Image (tube, rainbow, N blue to C red):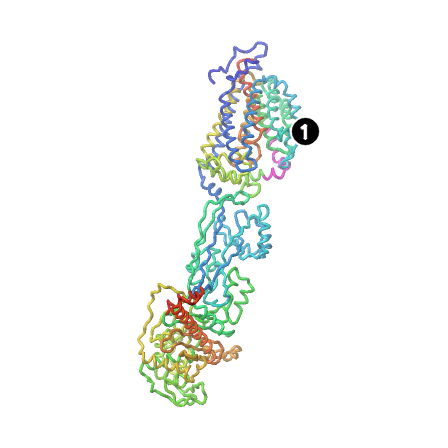
């Protein structure tokens, strides 16, 4: 605007005083205002500079956190199926409540806790636990909402009341068979803070639901899927305005077991409400067909956070229902150990089938008198009679001849004294005593007198039911031990452990075990028409009986009853070990084994008949029902 | 007077800058209100701008000396209108600020009082005899401005009331402030400011505390400041694009089409857009100052400088608030914020500036 003169002094009108209309007033002051204006603008620009140019990431991040909400999409765990594909462990739909923590008002926690029947203190503790997770990730605070709680959430989750609450659909674990095979399957639960600090669980995040016991734990990585995420755009009221990212959940894979639900049910029923365990194995491949432990628990109680009274009831139960007795009970095997003693004698050549002793109801060794279980004695006893009648005096003599270290050698050869390696956590080892063992543990020499007790499966010797089934199964199949396993894997490559055993000697032992059941021996109750069942009874004092004798508890301690049976004798395809705690007499455990073996062969006959019928009359008979056709494929795989 | 009304004599640079700012404002209002109940605000604002241009033309065509001569009448009318607002005004958000007009429009009287005060201060200072401001005149002038201020504060609308102060300050400064007066005013301010804390309403106190420490209550009174800073910062250098700012579009930013419009603008247009926009505002102010420098007489200069002071104060407080360097006062950004009264009032003032310009070769 420089073309316009700013000092038009010659234009001044004459009728007005020059002083008032002088346009040259205050040019300095106006310049000052110009500088002030410039300063104000620089001040404002500086404000924008520091927000937008110096560290815009900081604010972009905050803007994103403002508007993006990450909602988990929970991956369902894989199902667990029996060998025929029947569902043992399933999932069911449920709703969980998740809490978004970004806009959480602490005073709202009281209302939420009250509405969901939660303890306010515990809710706060839970929030504390999740401090390390990003705030935009909501956390699950209650699972398996009841209809009443659902109604509460629906009524109050609006933006005006409790916008923190969000509902999440989840596939929760369901154990439709309740306590059936509970110890094998285990249970799931939320990973605890203590667990997160252990190497096994360090890879998980707070809030993850993981297997805590049994197969659920052993195969957690297989069963557990990968959670997905839904990233949604929300506005200032928390309302969803759009989907910006979706990561699909990868469901966990199903797990096919070797367990046969039919056998499992029979074994479970056969136990009635007795305390103990049953293990059924296929000695030809190590597949576990049934595994029962009693008393049992209901894994459904663990799926969401377990109620404290339930937990107290389970953990304070003196019967210890959480213990998987099939792999964790370490007890003296009693007379069930005798086949191994017999084999040790035969293999070392220290006895033969002509070797015999006189049983007068007991015998003295090293200054101590040892009773036989029959007071009046068995008379002349050789190997076969020794096994069928379970004559203690005969085996005292065998053990005395063979010596503790030979006994230990053959016991370990059979698989006792160490883990079988079954695919379950926390398997127990048991104890096979020997001179070296005693020196290592007690720093003492072995006394020959101690061998006498071990020879009838007492003393320091302890085994688990699984170990017994495994040991006898391998022994009667001629020295081939397959590692017991619960998961059916068609690509399984593992070779069995093969030990050199004279098959004649093994045959002599098997013949003795045939006599136990079929020739008026101690295991007559296991007899089945048309099936050659073999087996061995055992009744064992608790390993620690001596120590407990004078305590209050000692009075109630009865002998444990054992029975290990297999069939058919000539080519065993199933071996079953049953433990009936405080059952006193081994013959009381025999019917349990008999029932399981019967169920096995009944099923086999049924499928065989179906296959035969199908082959013979395909054009006449109605199509077999679906379930049967499934059995068919199984039968074809296991002829 | 027809020879003064030539279109070519208008301040075209000023006009171009003004329309450019308004256009960006309309675009930003459109973006910020997309999909809300305010979605029709952008074309209403367009109407206001055209009405404003007409009002500016009208104001420019009237000799400012005439208007100045009637300043006291306008002043009395303004006081009466403010009393009417207090008694019968429409209450919105806990404040009585509007007089309902026909067709659903509302008039915010306090906006137009600004123009009246500019004329009044110019008239008063022009009438002074000496080069220096006497204590008596200072007191009288202060009293004249304080009266409408008190009425507006009563509405309550502290922000708008405060915008009257720079008009007074500019007038006093140009009239020739004695340094003794500066000392006295500073002393009085030092004494009155702490005492005035007790006169503030709770929400006003909260705003001040929040200004000093916004993290103190992020979901409460600090919310606006924090969300505004996040919006500005998230814009970065290049901005997120029109209708793409998440803070604006998802309504985390409060009132993104009125008081916080520059925050929404900064988010969607980035630092570059901000520099361009602030540049336009700077040009506007410099153009107003230039009109003051070229004014044919003291009265014209005083009017132009009054307008300059008022606009500068608005920019400082509103945009300073957006970047968290000024407390939240809730005054609009001239020419950009949505609102008829604000737009018309600013165009009216720019009309006065043009009126001064049209008469720069005569007197």
Q: Chain of mark 1?
A: B
Kindly identify which residue carries mark 1: B84
- Label total for image: 1
Q: Which sits in the foreground, B316 or B227?
A: B227
Q: Quadrant of residue A418?
A: bottom left
Q: Which sits in the foreground, B106 or B212?
A: B106
Q: Quadrant of residue A431?
A: bottom left
Residue A181 location (% of width, % of height): 47, 68
Q: Is residue B261 above or below residue B305?
A: below
Element carrying mark 1: helix
Please, which residue is most extreme toward the top here?
A14
Quadrant showing the C terminus of chain A: bottom left
Q: Residue at x 63, y 26 (%)?
A: B145
Q: Is residue A185 visible?
A: yes
- Graded by Cα atoms within 10 Å as few (under 14), some (14 to 19) or many (20 or more), the crowding at tag 1 reads some
Q: Of helix, strand and loop, which mostly describes the magenta segment?
A: helix
Please, which residue is most extreme toward the front here?
A620
Residue B309 location (% of width, % of height): 55, 26
Q: Is residue A629 above or below residue B98?
A: below
Question: Could you tell whether A471 is left or right of A161 in the image?
Answer: left
Q: Which sits in the foreground, B42 or B122?
A: B42
Q: Is residue A312 above or below residue B131?
A: below
- Whether residue A505 appears in magenta in the rendering, the answer is no
Residue B274 location (% of width, % of height): 47, 32
Where are the magenta residues, as a range? Answer: B183-206
Q: Is residue A435 visible?
A: no
Residue A32 location (% of width, % of height): 51, 24
- Whether residue B186 appears in magenta in the rendering, the answer is yes
């Amino acid at each position: 605007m420089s073309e316009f003169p700013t000092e038009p002094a010659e234009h001044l009108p004459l009728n007005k005083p020059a002083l008032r209309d002088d346009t040259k007033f205050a040019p300095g002051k106006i310049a000052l205002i110009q500088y002030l204006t410039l300063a104000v603008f620089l001040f404002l620009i500086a404000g924008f500079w520091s927000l937008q140019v110096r560290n815009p990431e900081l604010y972009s991040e905050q803007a994103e956190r403002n508007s993006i909400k990450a909602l988990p999409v929970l991956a369902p765990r894989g199902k667990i199926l029996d060998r025929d594909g029947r569902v043992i462990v399933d999932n069911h739909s449920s709703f969980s409540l998740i809490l978004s923590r970004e806009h959480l008002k602490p005073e709202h926690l009281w209302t939420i806790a009250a509405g969901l029947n939660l303890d306010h203190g515990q809710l706060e503790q839970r929030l504390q636990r999740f401090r390390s997770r990003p705030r935009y990730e909501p956390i699950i605070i209650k699972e398996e909402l009841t209809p009443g709680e659902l109604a509460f959430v629906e009524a109050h989750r609006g933006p005006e009341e409790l916008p923190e609450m969000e509902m999440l659909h989840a596939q929760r674990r369901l154990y439709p068979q309740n306590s059936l095979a509970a110890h094998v399957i285990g249970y799931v639960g939320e990973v605890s803070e203590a667990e997160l600090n252990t190497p096994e669980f360090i890879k998980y995040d707070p809030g993850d639901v993981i297997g805590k016991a049994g197969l659920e734990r052993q195969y957690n990585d297989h069963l557990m899927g990968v959670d997905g995420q839904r990233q949604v755009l929300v506005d200032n009221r928390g309302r969803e305005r759009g989907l910006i990212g979706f990561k699909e959940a990868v469901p966990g894979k199903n797990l096919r077991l070797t367990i046969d639900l039919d056998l499992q049910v029979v074994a479970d029923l056969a136990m009635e409400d007795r305390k103990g365990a049953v293990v059924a194995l296929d000695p030809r491949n190590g597949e576990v067909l049934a595994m029962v432990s009693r008393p049992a628990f209901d894994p459904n109680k663990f799926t969401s956070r377990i109620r404290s009274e339930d937990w107290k009831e389970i953990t304070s139960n003196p019967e210890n229902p959480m213990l998987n007795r099939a792999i964790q009970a370490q007890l003296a095997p009693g007379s069930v150990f005798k086949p191994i003693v017999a084999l040790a004698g035969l293999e070392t050549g220290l006895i033969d089938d002509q070797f015999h002793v006189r049983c007068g109801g007991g015998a003295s060794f090293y200054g101590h008198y040892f009773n036989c279980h029959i007071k009046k004695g068995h008379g002349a006893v050789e190997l076969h009679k020794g096994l069928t009648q379970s004559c203690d005096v005969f085996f005292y003599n065998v053990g005395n001849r063979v010596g503790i270290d030979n006994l230990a050698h053959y016991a370990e050869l059979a698989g006792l004294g160490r883990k079988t390696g079954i695919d379950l956590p926390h398997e127990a080892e048991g104890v096979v005593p020997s001179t070296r063992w005693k020196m290592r543990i007690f720093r003492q020499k072995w006394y020959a007198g101690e061998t006498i007790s071990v020879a009838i499966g007492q003393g320091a010797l302890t085994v688990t039911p699984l170990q017994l089934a495994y040991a006898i199964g391998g022994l009667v199949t001629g020295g081939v031990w397959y590692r017991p396993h619960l998961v059916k894997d068609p690509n399984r490559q593992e070779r069995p452990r093969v030990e050199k055993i004279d098959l004649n000697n093994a045959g002599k032992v098997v013949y003795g075990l045939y006599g136990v059941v079929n020739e008026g021996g101690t295991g007559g109750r296991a007899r089945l028409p048309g099936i050659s069942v073999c087996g061995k009874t055992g009744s064992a004092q608790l390993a620690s009986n001596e120590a407990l004798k004078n305590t209050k508890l000692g009075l109630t301690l009865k002998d444990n009853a054992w029975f290990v049976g297999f069939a058919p004798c000539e080519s065993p395809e199933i071996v079953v070990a049953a433990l009936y705690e405080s059952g006193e007499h081994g013959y009381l455990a025999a019917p349990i084994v008999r029932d399981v073996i019967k169920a096995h062969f009944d099923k086999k006959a049924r499928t065989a008949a179906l296959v035969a019928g199908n082959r013979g009359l395909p054009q006449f008979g109605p199509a077999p029902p679906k379930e049967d056709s499934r059995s068919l494929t199984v039968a074809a795989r296991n002829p | 007077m027809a020879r003064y009304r030539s279109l070519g004599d208008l301040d075209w640079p000023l006009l171009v800058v003004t329309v450019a700012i308004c256009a960006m404002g309309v675009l930003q209002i459109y973006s910020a209100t997309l999909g809300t109940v305010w979605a029709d605000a952008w074309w209403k604002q367009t109407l206001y701008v055209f009405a404003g241009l007409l009002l500016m033309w009208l104001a420019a065509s009237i000799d400012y000396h005439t208007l100045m001569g009637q300043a006291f009448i306008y002043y009395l009318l303004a006081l009466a209108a403010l009393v009417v607002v207090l008694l019968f005004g429409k209450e919105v958000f806990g404040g009585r600020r509007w007089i309902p007009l026909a067709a659903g429009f509302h008039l915010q009287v306090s906006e137009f009082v600004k123009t009246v005060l500019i004329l009044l201060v110019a008239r008063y200072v022009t009438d002074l005899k000496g080069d220096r401001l006497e204590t008596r005149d200072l007191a009288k002038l202060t009293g004249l401005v304080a009266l409408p201020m008190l009425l507006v504060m009563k509405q309550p609308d502290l922000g708008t009331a405060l915008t009257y102060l720079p008009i007074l300050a500019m007038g006093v400064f140009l009239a020739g402030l004695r340094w003794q007066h500066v000392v006295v005013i500073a002393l009085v301010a030092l004494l009155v400011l702490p005492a005035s804390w007790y006169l503030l309403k709770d929400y006003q106190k909260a705003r001040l505390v929040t200004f000093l420490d916004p993290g103190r209550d992020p979901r409460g009174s600090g919310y606006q400041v924090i969300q505004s800073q996040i919006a500005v910062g998230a814009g970065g250098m290049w901005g997120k694009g029109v209708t793409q700012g998440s803070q604006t579009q998802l309504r985390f930013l409060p009132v993104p089409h009125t008081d916080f419009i520059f925050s929404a603008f900064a988010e969607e247009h980035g630092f570059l857009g901000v520099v361009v926009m602030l540049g336009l505002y700077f040009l506007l102010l410099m153009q107003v100052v230039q009109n003051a420098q070229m004014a044919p007489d003291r009265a014209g200069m005083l009017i132009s400088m009054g307008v300059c002071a008022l606009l500068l104060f608005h920019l400082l407080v509103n945009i300073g608030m957006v970047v968290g360097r000024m407390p939240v006062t809730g005054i609009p950004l001239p020419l950009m914020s949505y609102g008829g009264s604000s737009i018309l009032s600013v165009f009216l003032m720019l009309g006065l500036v043009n009126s001064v310009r049209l008469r720069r070769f005569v007197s």
